[in-house]
Amino acid sequence: MIREAYAKELQRIQDEVMLLGSMVGDAILKSVEVLKRRDHEGAKCLRKADREINQRRYAIESDVLTLIATQQPVAGDMRVLAAVLEIATELERLGDYAKGIAKISLKIGDEPLIKPLLDLPVMAQKGVDMLRRALDAFAHRDVEQARQIPHEDDAVDDLYDQVYRELIAIIMGNPRTIDQANYLMWAAHNLERTADRVTNICERVIFMVTGEMVEIGRKGVREYN
Amino acid sequence: MAMEATKLEVNHCDFYYGGFRALKDVQVQIPANRITSIIGPSGCGKSTFLRLFNRMNDLIPGARAEGEIRMDGQQLYDLDIVELRKRVGMVFQRPNPFPKSIMDNVAYGPRAHGVRDRVRLEEIVERSLRDAALWDEVKDNLDKSGLALSGGQQQRLCIARALAVEPEVILMDEPASALDPVATLRIEELIQTLKKHYTIVIVTHNMQQAARASDYTAFFMMGEDREGYLVEYGPTREVFTNPKDRRTEDYITGKFG
């Protein structure tokens, strides 16, 4: 290895992505916990955590641009940095979902919940589990894992449909629940989108390792190069 | 790659300096009107490869090539050497103008090939200097010594001198490595305009230069036995974004040198 400082910085940036990913995963799990318990203090903490997530994302972006400008990375190294820029953006958005759910908890206030929160924590757990394994695939250049994870998105989508139907039924039974039902729908939507963004991360891992630009959807894999 | 017309072609070529094989089984098709860069660590045979095309290696006693080297389908060794050197021009690492006026430097080749008419020579000199992006800087001082120019200007003068005999191919052996960064970028820009009319093959130690300035890149390495061989050859944008060979990746990302 002749470019040691460069190699170290390239690795450090990837470690930063892993750290950011772990913060984001924790924030999502915590946000559903906060909503369940209407923990106002916890909700405020999550807002603060989101600011840190945003800062870290911009720091990663800035470090990537500096490395490009000063070291002229090419080939696999360049693909790592392109993937890092995309993944950091996805993680920042995932952080926004956690903040959004915390905000919903504050909006619902101390009002009793119109239904026990059972599916939302399962969705969050599933989404974060996918996220952690996607980051694992990123760290270990594991293309096979990156190709598999997006298929689990269907389970999250099914849960979302279930929550949706349940909330509609509650609204129809008692129209005065509409505000809270809307808020909960919004939270469920954020969690459903979480799994979609994990799919984007997986696609970037595939690109990083193989150079293939693919989109993994319900109907299969679409190639772009 | 198959879509482009091939200008130069090397098939199963080995090149020897006496008993030492400097190039082993090289296969390359160099497309016409494109810039092809040759990269690789020192000693991998880049310059030897470049010099196959104007048979400059042959000046070294004991040197010989085996296999096919073709230009426009014709075996290079079937061509008259004077004719070959006219069709294949060369620019070297250090600018090497003759200790003569700018005019005489550029007119040297055409004169050697028998052009005597003064008006015709002036036309050739102006066209060559314009094509080498030097005309505007020297047009009022054509009698000035070529050696009085800056390094970057001297190199462009050498390019003009090569263009004056209207070659088809221009070989460049690290044409910018003795120049400052701005002069380097000017040479790279110039090469881009020249490819309209010429096929350009350029050896460079500067990987970013290969990435910036060439259409195709060939990566050479040296084996255990010090024999140079071709590792990978393809469109530059592919070689620098997604090389097929692990050794190319390691070299261009600086994992070995």
Image (cartoon, coloured by chain):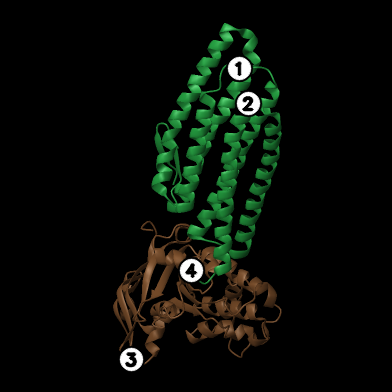
Foreground label between 4 and 1:
1
Q: Residue at the spot x=32%, y=90% of the render?
A: B18
Mark 2 — on which chain does it sit?
A
Q: At label 1, which amino acid type do we have?
A: Ala
* Label 4 element class: loop
Q: Residue at the spot x=59%, y=30% of the render?
A: A32
Q: CA distance from mark 3 to mark 2?
A: 88 Å
Where is residue A213? Give x, y as percent: 46, 46
User: Are dots 1 and 2 on a single chain?
Assistant: yes
Nearer to us in this view, B218 or A91: A91
Q: Which mark is residue B62?
A: 3
User: Label 2, on which residue?
Assistant: A37
Q: Which mark is residue A181?
A: 1
From the image, state the color of chain B.
brown
Q: CA distance from mark 4 to mark 1?
A: 57 Å
Foreground label between 4 and 2:
2
Foreground label between 3 and 1:
1
Question: Looking at the picture, does residue A110 appear above or below residue B80?
Answer: above
Q: At label 3, which amino acid type do we have?
A: Gly
Q: Which chain is green?
A: A
Q: Which mark is residue B255?
A: 4
Q: At label 4, which amino acid type do we have?
A: Lys
Work out whether mark 4 precedes mark 3 in sequence or the reverse, and give the earlier one: 3
